[in-house]
Each structure stands twice: as C-alpha cells, then as structure tokens.
Image (cartoon, rainbow, N blue to C red):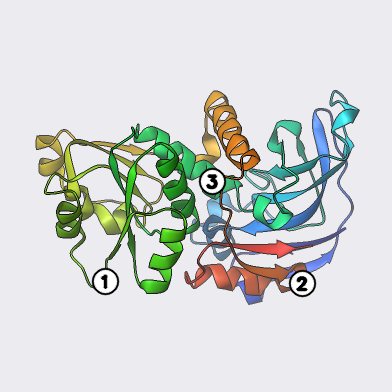
Amino acid sequence: MRAAYYDDLGPATTVLRVDEWADPVAGPGEVLVRLRSSGVNPSDVKSRSGIFGRARFLGRTIPHSDGAGDIIAVGAGVPTSRIGERVWVWNGQYKRLMGTAAELIALPEIMAVPLPATVGYDEGACLGIPAMTAAQAVRLCQIEPGETVLVSGGAGAVAHYAIQLAKARGATVLTTVSGEAKAAHARAAGADATINYKSEDVIARVRDLTGGAGADAMIDMDLGVNFKQIESLRPFGRVAVYGVSGADVPIPGRWSLQNSVSINFLYVYEQPPALRASIVRELSALMAQGKLINAVAARFPLADVAAAHEAVETGTAMGNVVLEM
C-alpha cells in the first residue's frame, strides 16, 4: 500500500513523505479497511509539528485519526458479513503508529462504523474527531429546547457540527466568526445569529440578542482565548470546552462562582465506551435521515499530504480538509 508518514517532528514540507508500505493484516477482532478518504484535523497537524512535545512521538508515524472506506477483510471473531461494508473510522492513529493517511488500515471492528450509502467517503472522513467532539459538547451542556447556546468559531469543523446538533435539540444558536464568508457558512449549518468577534463586543452582543438575560450554555474551542466570554452566560450557565491554548487558562473565577457557572472539559479520544456508542447511534440516525451536513472544505490527493496539512495550519478552511486515496 501507499501511505504518508513522518520519521521526525517538524514542518509539513520537511518531514512528511509518501512511499510504499507493507499491507496491514486484520488481527483477532479487527477489520481491514481500504480507505478512500482521510480526514486532516488540527490535532494531526499539531502532533506532526511537535507542538505537543516529543514525549508523545513514538517513532515513524502514519498520521490522521479519521477516515472512510470499505471493509475488505476481517480477523478472527468478526462476522464475515462485514466484508464489503462502507464505513467511517475514528481514532485511527490515537496511541497507534498507523493512522488513516494510507490506502489500508487494520483496527478494532468497533472503530469502523457503517456509512450510509447516501453519504460520500469524503464526508464520512469528516466525522470522527469533529462530530464526536461536538456531540459530547452538546451533551455536556445539557441543552434543552428553547435554550440559547453560544458556539465559538462557528466556521470551524467542530462548531459546524455543534451548531447542527444544538439546533436538533431545539436550541437558539449564536456563534462567533471573523468575517462574512464564515458567517454565511455558520448560517448554512443553522446558526440563528453570528457575532463578528473582531469588530463586535461578544458579551454585549449576546446580552443584546438574549434580551439582557445571557446565553444558557457555551461551547468553546479555545478557553485560553475566549475565557472572558463566559461572562455572556446567565446564572447557572454551562460551558463545554474542547480546546485550550497554553498550559494555564485564566477564567473569571469570582464572576463564575457568583453566577454558579459550571465548566466541563472534554477529550474526545477518551470517551467512555457507553457515551461513544450513544454518540455513534445519534450521528448514524441523523445521517440516515439526511439531517447532518458534513462540510468538506478542500480535497487533496495523498501525494499532496503536506499541502493538506498546511491548509489546516492556516486556519482559513471553512470545513474539513481531506486526503483522497
């Protein structure tokens, strides 16, 4: 098989290579997936660049956690009826050296989820990290019909799903963006109102849009940057955080205490099995009903994996970046 890989950490054009590899084999309890698409997430880029430090680098690595393709073989204990299934996969490279930036991957069968015939492989490769993160965040916020939720970075991959999932629960969704193109992208996902954080006071605008009451919940992509926005919540507001820049995060502690705000952090790679299974069922049902938009921002061939990583690093992509095998 052909696969992208890196032997050391550093810039995409310096360390990423594409070459022939031995085909993996499905072991007991595993399936072998012929990948059609591989999702490129910010965490994949950060791992390759070395931003997480060398402690997490275990050696030659085929990157990427997310992907989609077809099951072509199964290991012992897996029903042969699964051969031929179209699937999307998650955590492909988490705590493993062989991710989805390859033509083949062998992984536990639970990590290969049936993909509806109506959903393309590129769209399926978007799901893993972004959609599962969004689904857990919406659940942590305990969003109820009629409530208002503030989603930061509304044009991002996770936020795009969070907007949709919050709307599916009957919420009013406000989201922050940096320009009109991103505002249009967020509205396409169902956002009721957008706030340009570069030109508007986010807290004041949320108060204005909620008649002075504040939002009921907040789903945040980077608490290290957006910590002040907690003050846009009403008393007993809930916050779900899926990203933090920097080692330490300042928060308006006294204000949060006096307003009984709860803050929950989530790490999508370590979701409890029961929670992950429930999220998979939710996403599968929405896709089967044609109610989930999987936004592909850009497509690259496997040979251009470095360019795909750079497209993610710029932060300008509105949606997911995928590699096509």
Pick whichever of labels 2 and 1 is earlier in the sequence. Answer: 1
Task: Name the element at disc 3.
Answer: helix
Q: Is residue 7 visible?
A: no
| Pointer 1 residue | 198
Which quadrant is home to the N terminus?
bottom right
Pick whichever of labels 3 and 1 is earlier in the sequence. Answer: 3
Q: Is residue 188 left or right of residue 18?
A: left
Find residue 245 and report its horizontal and vertical position in percent.
36, 57
Based on the displayed image, in which of its 4 quarters is residue 72 positioned? top right
Find residue 33 and report its horizontal and vertical position in percent.
82, 45
Q: Is residue 22 left or right of residue 207?
A: right
The amino acid beneath tag 2 is: Ala
Q: Residue at x 53, y 41 (%)?
A: 132
The residues bearing labels 2 and 1 have C-alpha atoms spaced at a distance of: 37 Å
Label placed on residue 303: 2
Nearer mark to the viewer, of 2 and 1 = 1
Task: Name the element at disc 2.
Answer: helix
